[in-house]
């Protein structure tokens, strides 16, 4: 019994269940629960930048062959584009088949203040700016703000520079190895409070939105979860089969991370842990260091499923008939806009509003309908994103001969 209560899986599940109960019956605890959840995310966030930087630098420096770095990065980006496009297409097909927005009556209370913030952010977002934003004007500022893309860019350059030093760079590599061990040790300490973070996240969500809020948009939610389930156990499972590893074994190996994402609704809450787990699963550090951080910006399968379904859903809500050509156009735009969904607060709404503004067919203010229940769909997005990034890492590692089976 003592072993059960000290098991992290059990503690996280217990935290989630307690969060549901507290959120239902002690709604006044909501603000405190939000504070608990946010502070847990902050604990994780403080580790993300240094861990990503150190892992990428050590990975590139450890490869030796810089052509290999380019090959691994190219394979990863090609994989991301193919799989995320599949996710978009599947989302559009399911939304057309199930028609979650047909006959919808808008009786959801709208937070117009929050909507205005998202609309302004979408209006200010230009995709050329997003691309140029990858290059940091001040690397220290990038670390302070936790900008993953800028840190990734700088870490790759730093890794190349260190690699060119040859044996002269060994003292720096040895120092970074020790620092990496320190940060992963800190991460293990932080993960012990994951049950508290999961409790706070669930209690806040239920206390603020309530179970009843789900009813009017239940079909959309069910559609998103169903599509995510099909994508994981259909598409990703097929990829696992083709590359000769078990999806179930992989999911069992990351079960703690799955539970934490379920409780916190954030895949970033397990980013450092996933990098560590992928190494233990058999992927080389060099591949993990390149693929996982890049995946968090370019391989958001769950987010792309949600975005594609949300656009079709809103078209059905406003009774806007979309031709096949228009839907293909939407998929093309989403292939671009979904790449900007990382590292932006409220990214789902910002990207969705930007896409609606680009196609000029569906009223952009329609995203207000989704405000109340987006938090409940974020679990599906975050879990699908996380699972997809881990599988991408294994696929690239296997294709490079950089995968060793667990002992």
Image (cartoon, grey):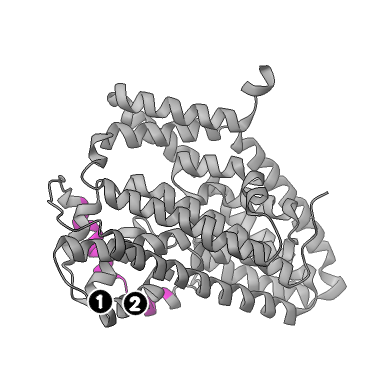
Mark 2, residue position: 333
Q: Is residue 211 left or right of residue 336?
A: left
The residue lying at 73 percent from left, 65 percent from top is 286
Residue 265 position within the rendered picture, expressed as x and y whole percent measured from the top left: 43, 45
Q: Is residue 213 visible?
A: yes
Do tag 1 and tag 2 residues touch (Cβ < 8 Å)?
Answer: yes
- Vertical side of 146 occupied by 202: above or below: above
Q: Is residue 88 left or right of residue 174?
A: left
Residue 29 position within the rendered picture, expressed as x and y whole percent measured from the top left: 33, 25
**Does residue 46 show up magenta in the picture?**
no
Q: Which residues are magenta?
A: 114-130
Residue 14 position within the rendered picture, expressed as x and y whole percent measured from the top left: 51, 26
Marker disc for residue 358: 1
> Most prominent secondary structure in the magenta stretch?
helix
Q: Nearer the viewer, residue 103 or 45?
A: 103
The residue lying at 35 percent from left, 67 percent from top is 93
Q: Is residue 366 left or right of residue 194?
A: left
Kindly report the distance in space between the C-alpha atoms of the residues bearing marks 1 and 2. Answer: 8 Å
Picture quarter with the N terminus? top right
Earlier residue among tags 1 and 2: 2
Tag 1 secondary structure: helix
């Amino acid at each position: 019994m003592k072993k059960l209560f000290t098991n992290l899986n059990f503690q996280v599940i217990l935290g989630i269940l307690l969060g549901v109960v507290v959120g239902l019956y002690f709604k006044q605890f909501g603000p405190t629960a939000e504070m608990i959840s946010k502070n847990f995310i902050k604990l994780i966030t403080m580790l993300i930048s240094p861990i990503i930087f150190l892992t990428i630098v050590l990975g590139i420096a450890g490869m030796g062959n810089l052509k290999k770095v380019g090959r691994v990065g190219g394979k990863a980006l090609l994989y991301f584009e193919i799989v995320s496009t599949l996710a978009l297409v599947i989302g559009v097909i399911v939304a057309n088949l199930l028609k979650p927005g047909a006959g919808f009556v808008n009786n959801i209370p709208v937070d117009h203040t929050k909507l205005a913030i998202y609309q302004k952010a979408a209006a200010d977002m230009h995709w050329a700016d997003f691309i140029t934003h990858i290059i940091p004007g001040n690397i220290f500022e990038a670390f302070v703000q936790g900008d993953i893309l800028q840190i990734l860019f700088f870490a790759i350059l730093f890794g190349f520079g260190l690699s060119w030093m040859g044996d002269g760079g060994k003292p720096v590599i040895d120092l970074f190895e020790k620092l990496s061990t320190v940060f992963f040790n800190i991460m293990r300490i932080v993960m012990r409070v994951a049950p508290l973070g999961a409790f706070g996240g669930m209690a806040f969500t239920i206390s603020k939105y309530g179970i009843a809020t789900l009813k009017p948009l239940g079909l959309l939610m069910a559609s998103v979860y169903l599509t995510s389930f099909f994508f994981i156990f259909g598409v990703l499972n097929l990829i696992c089969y083709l590359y000769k590893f078990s999806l179930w074994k992989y999911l069992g190996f990351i079960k703690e991370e799955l539970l934490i994402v379920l409780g916190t609704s954030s895949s970033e809450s397990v980013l450092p842990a996933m990098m560590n787990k992928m190494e233990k699963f058999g992927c080389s550090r060099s591949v993990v260091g390149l693929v996982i951080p890049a995946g968090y910006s370019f391989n958001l399968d769950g987010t792309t499923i949600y975005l594609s379904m949300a656009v079709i859903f809103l078209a059905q809500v406003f009774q806007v008939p979309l031709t096949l050509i228009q839907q293909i156009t939407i998929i093309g735009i989403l292939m671009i806009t979904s790449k900007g969904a990382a590292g932006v607060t409220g990214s789902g709404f910002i990207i969705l509003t930007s896409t609606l503004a680009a196609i000029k067919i569906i009223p952009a203010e329609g995203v207000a309908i989704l405000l109340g229940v987006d938090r409940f769909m974020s679990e599906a997005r975050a879990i699908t994103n996380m699972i997809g990034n881990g599988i991408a890492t294994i696929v690239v590692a296997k294709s490079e001969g950089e995968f060793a089976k667990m002992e």
